[in-house]
Amino acid sequence: MNKSVITIAMPKGRIFGDACRLLRNAGFQLPETFETTRKLILDLDSEPFRFILAKPVDVPTYVEYGAADLGIAGKDVLLESGRDVYEMVDLGISKCHMAVAGLPQHQSRNPFLKIATKYPNIASDFYRRRGEQVDLIALNGSIELAPIVGLADAIVDIVSTGQTLKENGLVEFDRLLDISSRLIVNPVSYRLKKTLIDQIVEKMIKATEGTKVGMD
Amino acid sequence: MSQPYMFEKPLGLRDTLPQAQQEISRLEMIFQRELQRWGYDFIKTPALEYAETIGRASAIADHRLFKFLDAEGHPVVLRPDMTTPIARIAASSLRQAPLPLRLAYTADLYRSQRKEGGHPSEFEQTGAELIGDATPYADVEVISLMMSLLEKSGLESVRLAVGHVGFVNAFFYDIVKDKNVVERLRNLLYNKNDVGFHEYVATLGLPSDVARQLNTFVDSRRMNNDETLEFLKTVVSGSATPVHSYYRNIIELVHLLKMDHLEGQIDLDITLVPHLSYYTGFVFQGFGGNLGFPVASGGRYDDLLAKFNRPCPATGFGIRLDRLMSAIKTPIDRNAQHKRAVIYNRENAGKAMRFAASEREKGHAVVLQHADGIDNPETFEQQFEAVNYFLERTETSE
């Protein structure tokens, strides 16, 4: 049986490499195969930590229900899911921003703007605040397609380098918010394993200070 | 909406099957006995209340209320909490009763859910309210009582987090002198968004020592109890009266909890801000077992009774039985009631009935079943820890 006392949910994909680097900087002895393995669960030899590798949008769910004590999740995913977890540290990694984008000089022929997005809650909140009526179309990927094939007038999506937008002939209209990865903690785990979790949080804050310098 | 299937229930509602109901009854009995031992009287209130009174005072967000019209066209709600109806009773039917009042309840509450399954819209809660006592001794009483109920329920590693929203509000107001900013800061605490809190503080243009104090405030969650008290001492030194008196209450509470030998289980967390907006003083949440959610919560609500025209301090808590059940690691005992069966035929009916009656008198659970009514004897008998047969044929019937 597993002797791990702390379970940490890691996001597979875009953020994973940055997150691993940060964990190593924070002093975690991650195995060398960590980034290449296909295993979904990994126990450390040196410390009582277990890592689970989840789809990024699912990380807050694992943490909210307590299946993981801590997790690393993008601010975009946190805002969209609205899960009840402590957002304790801005890790300053995997920075990007959320933007409205579309074809230049596009004239909408729809009575209400059609907006395609992977983030219906964030997009709906943004347009509600502005008092604009829009029709939201929820998609799961390759959002850039939507304006090109005429499914939507614009998209709300995350932009890191802008390369994908550029290659598909789209331009950015509005910037909604800046995004980076956060360390999140389950509220009950926090009470029951306070000492251990506080140690991890302190280590992560220290490691993060290194990344933050010169970025502000 | 598509036609519901015959077996379906409305969204978020569920049936409680015998095994789960047995566990609920066990908890109810433990809680009732213990609450009565502490001198609390049980009461009951209607499931339906007026939307303008209870609905509005309850502080449960509007979209989470089950709201409809009664026969006269008045908007009514299914009660979303019990504290508000009890406040109504304390301010009306029990207006003449001597204070402090000690009242308890077990009731089903209704809160509509938007999220996926696992968050029921109807759940049972046991709680207690101590009305009419403004001292921290009343807060300690309800905290000790809640801890005692959780311990007695069989929950493992019971822990409690205690904060004080009155202190939070007064402390923030002293610093920023703007109600809207206080509201925003408190909301960030409620959303557990430490990162957002730090970011927002940076936008306020405060002198750097004041900003540092706010930042240390939110980081004080990571301190142990002594460090937290030490930190509070430094922040109250220069501040005005309400902050000071709240601080003295916090010191007193920690002192009393020490005397009650509860201090080791308690995490003083001044950043704790629960969702119910009627709380004015101490607030607390109970945790334990393996569950990711708090099983119990409570706090002081000194302004709620004034909404029913009887200004009066009060404090109390509620324990969610559904969450407690999933947090307690009880092995499922299929014979939890240890039932026996008495299987009989026509000739032995009288004998079997007398036997069953005498067994029941001794306190055993006995099922009396005619043999002809059993479809499959083998599976039927498996349910019981013992079976007595009264099936002999009498000799006269040849």
Image: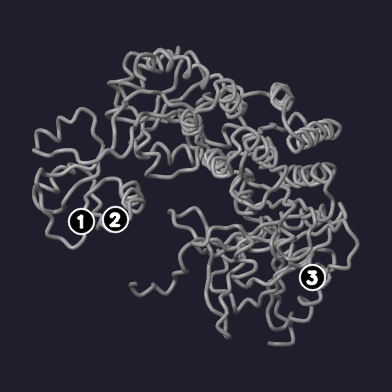
Q: In this figure, which residue is indicated by the disc labeled 2?
A: A132
Q: Which mark is residue A113?
A: 1
Camera-side residue: A77 or B215? B215
| Residue B244 rendering spot, x and y as whole percentages | 77, 33
| Residue B387 rendering spot, x and y as whole percentages | 69, 64
Residues beneath discs 1 and 2 located on the same chain:
yes
Q: Mark 2, chain letter?
A: A
Q: Is residue A21 above or below residue B93?
A: above
Q: Amino acid at mark 3?
A: Ser
Splitting the image into 4 quarters, where does residue B182 fall? top right
Q: Amino acid at mark 2?
A: Glu
Q: In this figure, which residue is indicated by the disc labeled 3?
A: B92
- Find the distance from the CA under tag 3 to the CA under tag 1: 54 Å
Asked if the residue at tag 2 contacts the one at tag 1, i.e. Cβ–Cβ closer than 8 Å, the answer is: yes
Please tell me whether mark 1 sits on a helix, a strand or a loop.
Answer: strand
Q: Is residue B291 visible?
A: no
Please tell me whether mark 2 sits on a helix, a strand or a loop.
Answer: loop
Splitting the image into 4 quarters, where does residue B20 fall? bottom right
x 10%, y 53%: residue: A107
